[in-house]
Image (tube, coloured by chain):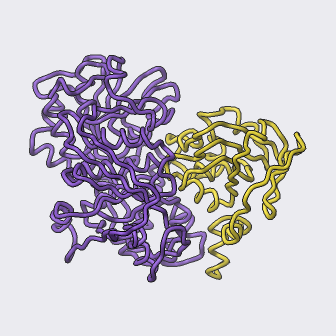
Chain colours: A yellow, B purple
Amino acid sequence: MGRAWKYGDDINTDVLYPGRYLDSYESSYLAAHALEDLDPDFAKNVKEGDVIVGGKYFGCGSSREQAASALKYCGVKAVIAKSFARIYYRNAINMGIPPIETPDVDKINDGDEIELDMENGIIHNRTTGEDIPFNPLPPFIMEIINDGGLVPHLKKKLGTD
Amino acid sequence: MSTIAEKILSRAVGHSVSADDIISARVDRAMSHDNAALVWKNFKSLGVDKVWDSEKIVIPIDHRVPANNIKAAEGQKTIREMVKLQRIKYFYGINTGICHQIMPEKGHVRPGWLIVGTDSHTTTYGAFGAFSTGIGATEMAGVWATGELWLRVPNTIKINVSGVLPKGVYPKDVILHIIGDISAEGANYRAVEFYGDTMENMSISGRMTVSNMSMEMGAKAAIIPPDKKTFDWLRPRVDGEVEGVYADADAVYEREIEYDVSALEPQVARPHTVDNVSPVSDVAGKHLDQVFIGSCTNGRTEDFEVVARILEGKKIHPDVRLIVGPASYEVYLESIEKGYIQTMIKAGAVIINPGCGPCLGAHEGIMASGERGLSTTNRNFRGRMGSPESELFLASPATAAASAITGEITDPRGWL
């Protein structure tokens, strides 16, 4: 279970992770600057297990994977949005963060406690008591996510783990 | 009954595929720029010793060149070591140019190829009839290990553009107009194919601007069917014969859209989204602090020809900083030979080395809070070119040049 951090439509990769911090790939550096231009308090207060909630076209813009990995290093466990930009959707999966699509993001408020049932496709909003259904991700994508992302998934497949 | 995307991906997988199929495709070229350091870090963690093909990986360093701080320098050092260790054949150091310009310049783009790159504007090579698309650094590590990548075969939107472009209106205005119309999300997950007499008459440079900016409507690939112009441009740069891949007459498109650009005005994207488009005349007169002309979108010789024509014998406004960045050293040298660079310098421009610097707010032209800029680049998200409290407008090189002279957003049609 985690807290929902709710934002609006078209949350782009420049506010998810500003270009000026693309000079290093260190996880603590990435975590420290996540969402800095959108919500300067986020990185300080986010906790392991929290989820991000956005509107339409979440993650539009650059292919920078740091826009997804910065969230992972902050402890974010899922991103819920009305729709995702193509590259961000792939990057989130590859980082092991499930991108969950639902038209009903309005049923989640900032600060709500959220629990996810990935297998059955249900977002339990523990604050409002409401259950929000979504289409479960296809099995081959869930396999990548359950393995912890593309790197551990490929290691398993290549037999190098 | 296949689109160009379906045909290229069918070849890449070895059997016939169509829209919505999920495939594991073999890639023809894999491009990574400064983020090759991150790809390498992920690749090493895979436990694989050698890359799948050291002659199909292309690595240009372009985002922070020369390195602007110690962190970036460390990353670039790592890349150089990796290139030697893995014997990567096509490495381009800080004296070559922006990845999307040098990929075709150096012969790494062909019609019908599947090209992936760890940069969203990899769609640029669609201007040469390739299926090229941006991917993340971790999945690129998978490509380096296996040569393959999973993809969903996209549906395709067919866009017909017709009409002769009026004086002062350029390919940048065409693509801004289209993005404004179909929205930033309008082509998300889709391939786009461009047709029509406007596209046929458009130069290779202009087509690159269109395919490059198509990313800003979400396009996965932005393909312009190759013609004689394409083949003439490519032939001296690639080995052997070049052949195009074309759609079948009965190809199935998700949607067809028509644009008549014969009465189009110069366009501008207003802060802070690329699809917030209006005619320049709607925002003319807004004061500017900085103008940037360059990038993979509009930093080519043809762009500088227009800029030099407007700036010839004039001085830029004393309150404006004009920064110009050629897309590559080939462009740079050609623009010096033709006198464009001298004209720009005499008018008051600062010429920076070929690279991506200002476009992503990395270095060489960062804006302060409260400042307003106009740029020929491809994105104007909040904080893109510096302070989150700055504003950025996107426009053609002609609009940028005219605006640098007046110090305010200016319709270029009175300056040509």
The reply to whether residue B364 is visible in this rendering is yes
Q: Out of B370 and B151, give the one closest to the viewer.
A: B151
Image position of A109 (left or right of B290): right
* Position of the N terminus of chain B by quadrant: bottom left
Q: Out of B5 and B57, give the one closest to the viewer.
A: B5
Residue B43 spot, x, y in % from top left: 54, 69
Q: Is residue B415 above or below residue B148?
A: above
The reply to whether residue B295 is visible in this rendering is no
Residue B11 spot, x, y in % from top left: 40, 78
Residue B404 spot, x, y in % from top left: 26, 24
Q: Is residue A88 above or below residue B243?
A: above
Q: Residue at x 48, y 43 (%)?
A: B184
- The answer to which image quadrant residue B396 occupies is top left
* Position of the C terminus of chain B by quadrant: top left
Image position of B35 (left or right of B87): right
Q: Is residue B215 above or below residue B352?
A: below
Q: Out of A62 and B187, give the one closest to the viewer.
A: B187
Residue B270 spot, x, y in % from top left: 42, 29
